[in-house]
């Protein structure tokens, strides 16, 4: 969660920051109409940069999800083997 992923305007942004951006600023479940100042820089960056038709923050969240699922794959397989009908 503390892994540094980008540095817009010299501010280090972590995986945690990306997740918080999408949940509190980008309109997800915990939407806050008055975002914290630390989210404003990342939100502006995300809106300016589009990757594959999506805002940068959302695209990074997709990449974070892929990496997380890859890391969890051994656990997922273990659960499948233990609890398969």
Image (tube, helix red, strand yellow):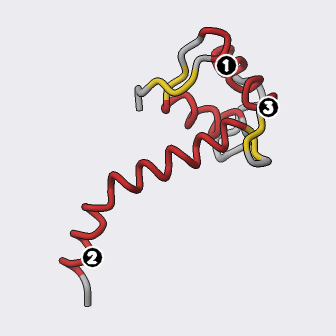
Residue at 81% x, 28% y: name it. Answer: 48
Label whose residue precedes the other's in the sequence (2 or 3): 3
Q: Residue 49 at what x, y percent from top left?
A: 77, 31
Q: Quadrant of the N terminus?
A: top left
Q: Residues within 10 Å of mark 1 (few under 14, many from 20)?
A: few
Mark 1 against mark 3, which lies toward the viewer?
3
Looking at this view, name the residue that lies furthest to the top: 10
Asked whether the beta carbons under mark 1 and mark 3 sit within 8 Å of each other, the answer is: no
Q: Residue 31 at what x, y percent from top left?
A: 70, 38
The disc at residue 17 is none
Mark 1 against mark 2, which lies toward the viewer?
2
Q: What residue sits right under mark 2 in the picture?
A: 80
Looking at this view, name the residue that lies furthest to the front: 52
Q: What residue sits right under mark 1 in the picture?
A: 36
Q: Relative to 9, say whether 6 is above or below.
A: below
Residue at 41% x, 56% y: name it. Answer: 69
Label whose residue precedes the other's in the sequence (1 or 3): 1
| Location of residue 35 (image quadrant) | top right
Asked whether the beta carbons under mark 1 and mark 2 sit within 8 Å of each other, the answer is: no
| Location of residue 23 (image quadrant) | top right
Residue at 21% x, 69% y: name it. Answer: 78
Q: Residue 43 at what x, y percent from top left?
A: 73, 26
Q: Relative to 52, say whether 5 is above or below.
A: above
Q: What residue sits right under mark 3 in the picture?
A: 47
Q: Relative to 62, say whether 19 is above or below.
A: above
Q: Quadrant of the C terminus?
A: bottom left
Q: Residues within 10 Å of mark 2 (few under 14, many from 20)?
A: few
Residue at 58% x, 49% y: name it. Answer: 62
Which SS class for mark 1? loop
Q: Is residue 63 left or right of residue 78?
A: right
């Amino acid at each position: 969660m503390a892994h540094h992923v980008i540095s817009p305007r010299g501010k280090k942004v972590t995986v945690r920051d990306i997740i918080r951006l999408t949940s509190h600023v980008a309109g997800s479940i915990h939407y806050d109409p008055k975002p914290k100042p630390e989210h404003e820089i990342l939100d502006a960056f995300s809106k300016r940069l589009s990757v594959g038709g999506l805002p940068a923050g959302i695209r990074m969240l997709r990449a974070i999800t892929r990496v997380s699922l890859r890391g969890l794959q051994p656990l997922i397989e273990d659960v499948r083997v233990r609890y398969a009908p």
